[in-house]
Amino acid sequence: MRKRVFSGIQPTGSLMIGNYLGAIKYWVASQENYDNVFCIVDLHAITVPQDPEALKARTREVTGLLLAAGIDPKRSILFIQSHVSAHSELAWILNCFIPMGWMQRMTQFKEKSARHKEQVSVGLFDYPSLMAADILLYDTDFVPVGEDQKQHVELARDTAQRFNSIYGETFVLPEPLIPDIGARIMGLDDPTKKMSKSETASGHAIDLLDPPDAIRAKIMRATTDSLREIRFDESRPGIFNLLTIYHLFSGRSQKDIEAQFEGKGYGDFKKDLAEVVIEGLRPLQERYRELTADPTRIDSILAEGADRARPIAEKVLAEVRRKVGLG
Ligand code: ATP
Ligand code: LTN
């Protein structure tokens, strides 16, 4: 039996290179060795305010981009979270087993509730319970995510362990898979903040669908420091972040890159970086255009994905309901 991989992504904005380098790239690679389930988590997206039309359109856009990045719907299950109602149902049941104290420690809630001060919903607080349900419904072994999601995957694991200790072996214990490099790509405008797709500042992120001119402009404006040396030095977050992006898109070694830019200025380096990113994204952008030429294609892939996901999730949910004494 192959091990199972599960991961999710929110349709909260245009996918950007942080999502790609920190997560999606590994999802694509894991198709070689694992049995994969990938989910577009629209129920998580509504934990903060969303425009209904935009949410629906972005859900299709994210699907198209995942396919263009190399997710193969024959090998992987790709579906929308709200199409499989077991997610909401298990989230409720898990709510009744997760101690308040565990949730109160979640750093993402602290950050997001500070950002959306005008309306902090109960759903935003409860986000990790729904995420635990996503993971546990599929007997997941591994969860490939960026660094920011590690705490949530650990909460899912703790929840599984707690449930198993009360009711006996029910859930598989999941483990996060976090890349050594690229797990936390920083904002171009502010390299002390994680790049985020729902941040709207124009120079913040490079979107996967950005045209070449936009990529050049954003990189040329990216915040660096007043030093000159082009080195992988973590204490200089701006240039370190740009070098990391260069390294990941070009596939070249850090040493090699440092040698190439020795004695050169930030301007030269940034110009080169922009071309590396443009070339790196070109095949994905072309595939995206081809795929979206037929608007019915994405919906039929999503419908089929939900049909394949549902029986797996419902089997686990039925066992949980029985053990808890529901029905
Ligand atoms: P939002 O800003 O709406 O919360 P996000 O940009 O953080 O969204 P998610 O949908 O939450 O994106 O994340 C999708 C995947 O991308 C997750 O595995 C997450 O860890 C990863 N990811 C997000 N931002 C980065 C980043 N800056 N660097 C590396 N990985 C990232
Ligand atoms: N919280 C995640 C998205 C997400 C997820 C999941 C990731 C929802 N459910 C299950 C892995 C497994 C995020 O914001 N990136």
Image (cartoon, rainbow, N blue to C red):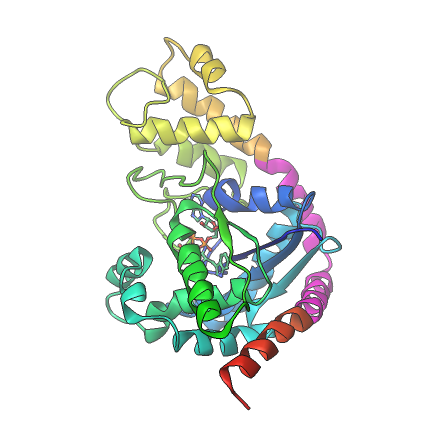
* Residue at (70, 71) in percent of width and height: 307
Q: Is residue 285 magenta?
A: yes
Number of numbered discs: 0
Picture quadrant where residue 181 is located: top left
The magenta span reads 281-309
* Residue at (29, 40) in percent of width and height: 190
Picture quadrant where residue 279 is located: top right
* Residue at (48, 39) in percent of width and height: 179
> Where residue 109 appears, x then y in whole percent?
31, 61
Q: Vertical placement of 19 versus 124: above or below?
A: above
Left or right: 296 with respect to 191?
right
> Where residue 128 appears, x then y in whole percent?
40, 64
* Residue at (45, 59) in percent of width and height: 157
Q: Vertical placement of 282 versus 73: above or below?
A: above
Provide the major secondary structure of the magenta segment: helix
Which is more toward the observer, 139 or 110?
139
> Where residue 177 appears, x then y in whole percent?
50, 45
Left or right: 295 with respect to 91?
right
Q: Is residue 85 visible?
A: no
Q: Looking at this rendering, what residue extends furthest in the right direction?
A: 74
Q: Is residue 88 visible?
A: yes
Which is more toward the observer, 318 or 86?
318
> Where residue 289 appears, x then y in whole percent?
67, 49
